[in-house]
């Protein structure tokens, strides 16, 4: 990892307390919040949580070879609370807020990187689209992607800090629930390509309306690279109004429902729960090329179009795109098919809002057997 203790200290503005065998110009091996994941010469960030306080594990991470612990308690305070002898510890970095330190480190590290970073947001489909984009880009690049749904102000910096020298492109999922969050995420990610899947009806408790959601999601553009590009869902009535963003003309993808769309998925032939065969058209390949999307549902076709739009920005050929799409598999909790001896279960239980529920029921309708929907609650919808 191309990051030293000195650089981490400068990024956080904290007080460095050199410890045993300190070499502040040594490169560290990684940055983690989980003490169980610390590696030799790694960095541990001690976060005080509601149930577990990371400061109680500082001694353990040093015994495992950590080079630095970022803390918000002095050695004396840690000794007083935990009873541990801190005299033999390696270096500590004392800051006011360790979570803010995590974000500061990630922001500084991102500025050192020269690879393309794709930032993805939207009300629904973020994770599936992230998987589609990463899968397609893997046909040309060594790709790092967000693990699971690590898409918030803790997950995003941890994702950025997993990028290594061999990484050639990064796909970062960015999720929010209130105004200002996306601005802070964008400040860390500094995307070269921004992708927005849709503007739905999630997090209405704080964002109030779809116009509020559009405003909050549009904060992703706040730190778009000067030569960056934007890929938007051209089927979405809110996103299609963004004709220009900070001097950038968006590239729209869709199903042919708007003349502004550049990447179009058409002649969709459903294979039921086994996916769809689609004709994809994009600039430079107006005659189109057929692809098989092994993920069922119209919404997955639209997510695949987002992947095609992004891949074209990064120079992938139709052959590479076709190969990447054909290798995809469902993500657990998001339309995953579980084949049991007596039935097939569609596992779509990760989360729900009106748009994702509609997509799930549309997916269920593709089954040519008796069907049962087991539904849970939808929260955080405010007055709606």
Image (tube, grey):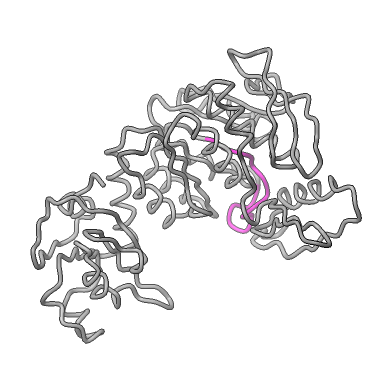
> With 58 as the anchor, is 335 left or right in this view?
right
Can you say which quadrant of the picture contains the C terminus? bottom right
| Region in magenta | 195-209
Quarter where residue 49 is shown: bottom left
- Which secondary structure type mostly characterizes the magenta part of the structure? loop
Q: Which residue is drawn at 64% across and 34% down?
A: 326
| x and y, in percent, of residue 359 in the image | 75, 47
> Percent x, y for residue 273?
78, 45
Q: Is residue 279 above or below residue 239?
A: above
Does the magenta portion include 53?
no
Q: Position of residue 338 (x, y in %)?
A: 72, 57
> Would you say 24 lies left or right of 337 here?
left
Residue at image coords 50%, 47%: 174
Left or right of residue 153, residue 18 in this image:
left
Residue 312 appearing in the image: yes
Q: In this view, does 269 lie above or below 88?
A: above
Which is more toward the observer, 338 or 34?
Answer: 338
Position of residue 379 measured from the top left corner of the image (x, y, whole percent): 67, 63
Residue depicted at x 72% and y 53%:
337
Magenta stretch encompasses residue 207: yes
172 shown above or below 324: below
Q: Quadrant of residue 68?
A: bottom left
- Residue extending farthest to the right is 370
């Amino acid at each position: 990892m191309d990051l030293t203790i000195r650089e981490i200290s400068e990024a956080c503005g904290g007080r460095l307390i050199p410890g045993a065998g300190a070499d502040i110009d040594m490169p560290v091996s990684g940055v983690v919040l989980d003490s169980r994941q610390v590696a030799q010469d790694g960095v541990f960030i001690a976060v005080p949580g509601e149930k577990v306080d990371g400061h109680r594990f500082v001694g353990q991470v040093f015994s495992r070879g950590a080079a630095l612990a970022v803390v918000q308690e002095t050695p004396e305070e840690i000794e007083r609370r935990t009873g541990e002898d801190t005299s033999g510890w390696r270096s500590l970095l004392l800051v006011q807020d360790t979570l803010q330190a995590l974000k500061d480190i990630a922001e500084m590290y991102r500025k050192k990187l020269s690879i393309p970073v794709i930032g993805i947001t939207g009300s629904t489909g973020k994770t599936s689209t992230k998987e589609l984009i990463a899968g397609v880009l893997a046909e040309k690049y060594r790709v790092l992607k967000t693990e699971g749904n690590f898409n918030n102000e803790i997950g995003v910096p941890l994702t950025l800090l997993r990028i290594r020298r061999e990484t050639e492109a990064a796909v970062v999922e960015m999720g929010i629930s209130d105004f200002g969050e996306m601005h802070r995420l964008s400040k860390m990610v500094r995307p070269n390509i921004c992708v927005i899947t849709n503007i739905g009806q999630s997090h209405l408790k704080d964002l109030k309306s779809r116009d509020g959601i559009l405003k909050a999601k549009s904060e992703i553009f706040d730190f778009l690279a000067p030569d960056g590009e934007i890929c938007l869902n051209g089927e979405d009535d809110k996103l299609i109004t963004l004709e220009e963003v900070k001097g950038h003309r968006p590239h729209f993808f869709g199903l042919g429902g708007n003349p502004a769309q550049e990447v179009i998925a058409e002649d969709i032939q459903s294979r039921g729960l086994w996916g769809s065969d689609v004709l994809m058209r994009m600039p430079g390949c107006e005659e189109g090329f057929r692809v098989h999307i092994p993920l069922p549902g119209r919404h997955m076709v639209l997510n695949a179009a987002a992947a095609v739009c992004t891949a074209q920005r990064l120079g992938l050929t139709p052959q590479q795109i076709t190969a990447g799409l054909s290798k995809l598999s469902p993500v657990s909790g998001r339309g995953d098919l579980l084949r049991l001896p007596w039935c097939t279960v569609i596992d779509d239980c990760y989360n729900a809002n009106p748009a994702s529920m509609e997509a799930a029921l549309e997916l269920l309708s593709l089954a040519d057997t008796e069907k049962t929907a087991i539904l849970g609650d939808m929260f955080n919808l405010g007055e709606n």
